[in-house]
Protein backbone atom coordinates (compact mmCIF):
# COMPACT_ATOMS: atom_id res chain seq x y z
CA UNK A 1 0.00 0.00 0.00
CA UNK A 2 1.24 3.48 -0.61
CA UNK A 3 0.17 6.95 0.39
CA UNK A 4 -0.12 9.82 -2.05
CA UNK A 5 1.23 13.20 -0.93
CA UNK A 6 1.70 16.69 -2.23
CA UNK A 7 5.06 17.58 -3.76
CA UNK A 8 7.42 18.76 -1.05
CA UNK A 9 5.47 17.28 1.87
CA UNK A 10 7.70 15.03 4.00
CA UNK A 11 6.47 14.05 7.48
CA UNK A 12 9.06 13.45 10.20
CA UNK A 13 9.92 9.97 11.48
CA UNK A 14 7.49 10.09 14.42
CA UNK A 15 4.58 10.94 12.12
CA UNK A 16 5.59 8.13 9.74
CA UNK A 17 5.73 5.66 12.64
CA UNK A 18 2.26 6.76 13.79
CA UNK A 19 0.89 6.39 10.25
CA UNK A 20 2.32 2.88 9.96
CA UNK A 21 0.94 1.87 13.38
CA UNK A 22 -2.54 3.26 12.68
CA UNK A 23 -2.78 1.49 9.31
CA UNK A 24 -1.73 -1.78 10.96
CA UNK A 25 -4.42 -1.35 13.65
CA UNK A 26 -7.08 -0.45 11.08
CA UNK A 27 -6.39 -3.67 9.20
CA UNK A 28 -6.17 -5.83 12.33
CA UNK A 29 -2.49 -6.50 11.61
CA UNK A 30 -0.86 -4.75 14.57
CA UNK A 31 0.76 -8.01 15.78
CA UNK A 32 1.94 -9.02 12.31
CA UNK A 33 5.39 -8.64 10.82
CA UNK A 34 5.86 -5.84 8.32
CA UNK A 35 8.42 -4.02 6.27
CA UNK A 36 8.17 -0.26 5.83
CA UNK A 37 10.05 1.73 3.27
CA UNK A 38 10.07 5.36 2.21
CA UNK A 39 11.48 6.84 -0.96
CA UNK A 40 11.28 9.61 -3.51
CA UNK A 41 11.44 7.88 -6.89
CA UNK A 42 8.62 10.18 -8.05
CA UNK A 43 7.91 13.85 -7.41
CA UNK A 44 6.32 12.81 -4.10
CA UNK A 45 7.93 11.39 -0.99
CA UNK A 46 5.91 8.31 -0.07
CA UNK A 47 5.81 5.25 2.13
CA UNK A 48 5.07 1.60 1.34
CA UNK A 49 4.04 -0.95 3.96
CA UNK A 50 4.19 -4.68 3.26
CA UNK A 51 2.39 -6.87 5.82
CA UNK A 52 2.88 -10.57 6.47
CA UNK A 53 -0.74 -11.77 6.62
CA UNK A 54 0.27 -14.89 8.59
CA UNK A 55 0.35 -14.22 12.33
CA UNK A 56 3.85 -14.99 13.70
CA UNK A 57 2.59 -17.02 16.70
CA UNK A 58 -0.75 -18.56 15.67
CA UNK A 59 0.21 -19.07 12.01
CA UNK A 60 -3.33 -18.12 11.07
CA UNK A 61 -3.80 -16.01 7.99
CA UNK A 62 -5.68 -12.73 8.35
CA UNK A 63 -7.14 -11.26 5.17
CA UNK A 64 -8.96 -7.99 5.82
CA UNK A 65 -12.24 -7.76 3.91
CA UNK A 66 -12.87 -4.51 1.99
CA UNK A 67 -9.61 -3.14 3.34
CA UNK A 68 -9.77 -0.07 1.09
CA UNK A 69 -12.61 1.28 3.25
CA UNK A 70 -10.53 0.97 6.42
CA UNK A 71 -7.47 2.44 4.69
CA UNK A 72 -9.43 5.35 3.26
CA UNK A 73 -11.03 6.34 6.57
CA UNK A 74 -7.72 5.87 8.42
CA UNK A 75 -5.90 8.00 5.83
CA UNK A 76 -8.48 10.78 6.22
CA UNK A 77 -8.12 10.68 10.02
CA UNK A 78 -4.31 10.75 9.79
CA UNK A 79 -4.31 13.62 7.29
CA UNK A 80 -6.28 15.72 9.77
CA UNK A 81 -4.34 14.52 12.84
CA UNK A 82 -0.94 15.38 11.34
CA UNK A 83 -1.94 18.37 9.21
CA UNK A 84 -1.15 16.58 5.94
CA UNK A 85 -2.54 17.46 2.54
CA UNK A 86 -5.98 15.88 2.05
CA UNK A 87 -6.04 13.41 -0.85
CA UNK A 88 -9.31 12.33 -2.49
CA UNK A 89 -10.30 8.74 -1.88
CA UNK A 90 -12.73 6.38 -3.51
CA UNK A 91 -16.40 7.20 -3.63
CA UNK A 92 -19.16 8.52 -5.79
CA UNK A 93 -18.24 12.16 -5.19
CA UNK A 94 -14.50 11.56 -5.50
CA UNK A 95 -14.21 9.33 -8.55
CA UNK A 96 -10.72 8.78 -9.81
CA UNK A 97 -10.06 9.51 -13.43
CA UNK A 98 -9.30 6.39 -15.47
CA UNK A 99 -6.40 7.53 -17.63
CA UNK A 100 -6.62 4.62 -20.07
CA UNK A 101 -10.30 5.26 -20.75
CA UNK A 102 -9.71 9.01 -21.06
CA UNK A 103 -6.83 8.48 -23.51
CA UNK A 104 -8.78 5.98 -25.62
CA UNK A 105 -11.75 8.35 -25.85
CA UNK A 106 -9.48 11.24 -26.78
CA UNK A 107 -7.63 9.28 -29.46
CA UNK A 108 -10.60 7.43 -30.95
CA UNK A 109 -13.24 10.18 -30.63
CA UNK A 110 -15.57 7.45 -29.33
CA UNK A 111 -17.22 7.43 -25.93
CA UNK A 112 -16.44 4.43 -23.73
CA UNK A 113 -19.10 2.51 -21.83
CA UNK A 114 -17.60 3.89 -18.62
CA UNK A 115 -17.90 7.43 -19.98
CA UNK A 116 -21.50 6.79 -21.02
CA UNK A 117 -22.39 5.56 -17.53
CA UNK A 118 -20.78 8.61 -15.90
CA UNK A 119 -22.63 10.93 -18.26
CA UNK A 120 -26.00 9.27 -17.61
CA UNK A 121 -25.70 8.27 -13.96
CA UNK A 122 -28.39 10.76 -12.84
CA UNK A 123 -30.83 10.05 -15.68
CA UNK A 124 -34.11 8.69 -14.22
CA UNK A 125 -34.51 6.33 -17.19
CA UNK A 126 -31.15 4.65 -16.53
CA UNK A 127 -32.15 2.86 -13.40
Image (tube, grey):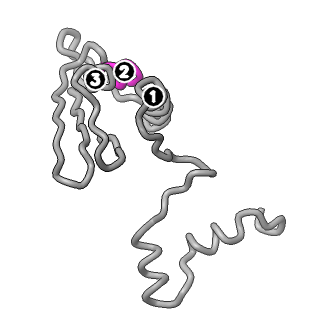
| Image: magenta residue range | 20-29
Q: Residue furthest right?
A: 124
Quadrant where the N terminus lies? Answer: top left
Q: Going from the N terminus, do you reach mark 3 or mark 1 first?
A: 3
Which circle marks residue 61 in the picture? 3
What whole-number distance in Å separates the C-alpha atoms at marks 1 and 2?
A: 7 Å
User: Residue at point 77% right, 62% down?
Assistant: 127
Whether 115 is drawn above or below 69: the answer is below
Instruction: State the residue at coordinates (23%, 29%).
Output: 51
In this rendering, the answer to whether 13 lies above or below 39 is: above
Q: Which residue corresponds to mark 2?
A: 22
Q: Quadrant of residue 118?
A: bottom right
| Label 2, residues with CA under 10 Å away: few <14, some 14-19, many ≥20 | some
Q: Nearer the viewer, mark 3 or mark 2?
A: 2
Q: Residue at x 21, y 33 (%)?
A: 50
Circle 3 residues within 10 Å: few <14, some 14–19, many ≥20: few
Amino acid sequence: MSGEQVKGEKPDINVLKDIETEFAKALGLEDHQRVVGTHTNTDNFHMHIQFNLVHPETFRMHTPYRDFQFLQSTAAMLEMKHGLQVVKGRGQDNERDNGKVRDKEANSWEQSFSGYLKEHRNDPDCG
